[in-house]
Amino acid sequence: MVLIKNASIMADGIIRKSDILFNEKILELAKEIVTSAEVKVIDLDGKLLIPGCIDAHVHFNDPGFTQRENFTSGTEAAACGGITTVIDMPCTSIPAVTNVENLKTKLSVINSKSLVDFALWGGIRRNDFPIKEETIAKLWSEGVVGFKIYTISGMESFEALTYDDIKSIFNDFPKILFAFHAEDKKIIVEAENNLTNEEKKLPENYIKMRPVKAEFIAVKQILSSLSENNSAHFVHISSKKAAELILQSKENSDITFETCPHYLQFIAADIPILKGRVKTAPPVKFKDDKEFLRNCLKIDQLDFVTTDHAGSDYKTGKEFDNFSKVYNGIPGTELMIPYIFSEFYLKEKVNLRTIIKITSENAAKRFGLYPNKGSLKIGTDADFTIIDLNRSFKVDESKLHSLGKYSPFDQKIFNCSVDRTIVRGKTVFDREHGIMQSPGFGKFIRRI
């Protein structure tokens, strides 16, 4: 057993110093706990302790594209960033997680690699149409948190669905959660055709190739197919218009949406400056979009924040003169929590209750992991993210634990840092000693 003393914890809407007694599970939480001398004691001296943080949207590319990232490097970055659970996407591994056999193949590889706990997304791709009902039902019963769908895809191995396909999926599979990369293919193709090949090479024209309208129209089309029996989640929402449409539809439908740190911090004008460090799909948009998403977070309208972590070998994948050939993706899981606490908790004074919801609780509830994940309830997993609010640091992209050594936040100063990451009662990372567990410590977590 371990006893944490003098942790600053939010309880009943108030931040107070408390003690926590735990082994793999939380045994007791009280103002002061007295135990025997055999119990290991960790004195946090007032540091902030919150439920273990969740990054519900990562691409760790394992097995398959492990030159970009693998499950050990990805989860090591996550642990160093205060993340205790990740949810990996189905599309950027070989084979894609589109049936039970492929799921088992993936698990046979990554079970021995993860440093933090992980859940998995299933996926639906056009390659497999017509979809057999038993394929989806069996994969759902194996505990995936939902099914990822693209409306536009650059991956031959994971083709996008049409809006008619999506409508049929909603009709055939009620009560199952579907997540959407929502950008309209027709609009993007037309926008690209309006540019010459030379114009496409320039980073300042990237936003013209994937305009705001593409996200808005795709979200609108998907929402129009929803019935009261369907559940939908929109990943990496980047624009005000799309977010407004989702918020308007929430009253009558089971809908959630996420955004990412890069959409909360950067705009299209930053792309020519940061170049490949901030190239994502969808791209960062404009000031109004950024401010609207930031306000959604502040007033508790945003469901949660994820990273869409997707790194590459920067020297071979990000430094092309032709920007259209630059890899779409940035590594982010190591910096999300320090960014949110520095930018929104310390600077913007967002309520800690709201911060906890967007970093752990809401994702755990949405994806069937709660209360074992995302809470500090007695009897649940002893997953803790511990933040030192008095220790700032400057981001040095060369020291990131991801295989991708680049970040749009390079050289930015965050006014807090992750002090310790605890998963099921074991310290996986602490600031003084680094990584404390071996690959394979992290466990597969099934949707409840």
Image (cartoon, rainbow, N blue to C red):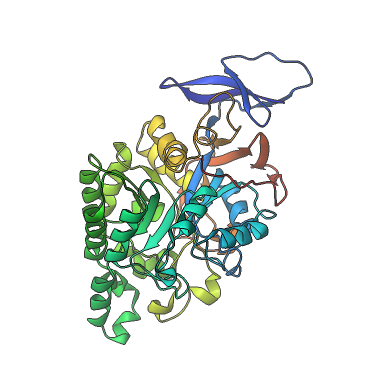
Front residue of 234 and 310: 234
Depicted 229 relative to depicted 64: above or below: above
Q: Name the image quarter holding residue 277.
A: bottom left
Relative horizontal placement of residue 116, taking residue 333 as reference (left or right) = right
Relative horizontal placement of residue 434, taking residue 346 as reference (left or right) = right
Q: Name the image quarter holding residue 262.
A: bottom left
Front residue of 100 and 52: 100
Front residue of 92 and 300: 92
At 59% from the left edge and 61% from the top edge, which residue is drawn? 101
- Count of numbered tags: 0
**Quarter holding the N terminus?**
top right
At 27% from the left edge and 77% from the top edge, which residue is drawn? 189
Depicted 428 relative to depicted 324: above or below: above
Relative horizontal placement of residue 199, taking residue 377 as reference (left or right) = left
At 24% from the left edge and 55% from the top edge, which residue is drawn? 225
Can residue 429 be seen in the rendering of this structure? yes
Q: Name the image quarter holding residue 112.
A: bottom right
At 70% from the left edge and 52% from the top edge, which residue is drawn? 439
Q: Residue furthest right?
A: 38
- Percent position of residue 345, x then y: 40, 36
- Percent position of residue 192, x then y: 27, 78
- Percent position of residue 445, x then y: 58, 44
Can residue 394 be seen in the rendering of this structure? no
- Percent position of residue 402, x then y: 58, 59
